[in-house]
Image: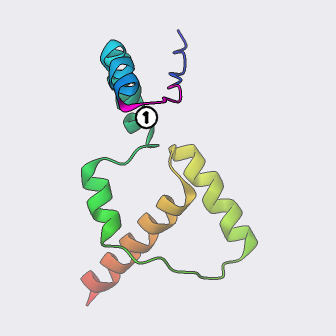
Amino acid sequence: MAKRKLIVPKFTSEVEDARWHDRHRRKVESAVADRIREGSVLTLRQAAARARTQPVTIRLAIQDMDKARELAEQKGIGYQTYIKMLLHEALRREVGDR
């Protein structure tokens, strides 16, 4: 059974906003939980980890990027997350070998 997407309307006041959320609390909580499971919303732990990261730009071969995207999709994760996991594992192995 497919879930219907929760659409939150635009509100003209905080009172209207609060009333709508009070009436739809369970739907909102369920939708947020679904988005966390899907990975489209950061948990507090993920947000804290992201705060300790530094964005980088590197040039990679198109074939490598295509393969990374393909493998990441098979695993059900984003390609950037997948590449970060690969790099982390390679660094851990390199340090462990010494």
55 sits to left or right of 14: right
Give the labeled residue for mark 1: 35
Q: Residue at x 37, y 70 (%)?
A: 89
Count of numbered circles on the image: 1
Quarter of the image where one finds residue 88 = bottom left
| Of 52 and 72, the residue lying toward us | 52
Q: Residue at x 74, y 69 (%)?
A: 63
Query: Residue type at mark 1?
Result: Arg
Determine the secondary structure under disc 1.
helix
Residue 11 coordinates in the image, percent (x, y): 48, 29
Quarter of the image where one finds residue 87 = bottom left
Rendered position, 4 above or below 66:
above
Q: Residues within 10 Å of mark 1 (few under 14, many from 20)?
A: few
Q: Is residue 12 magenta?
A: yes
Of helix, strand and loop, which mostly describes the magenta segment?
loop
Residue 77 coordinates in the image, percent (x, y): 50, 48
Quarter of the image where one finds residue 5 = top right
Rendered position, 10 above or below 81:
above
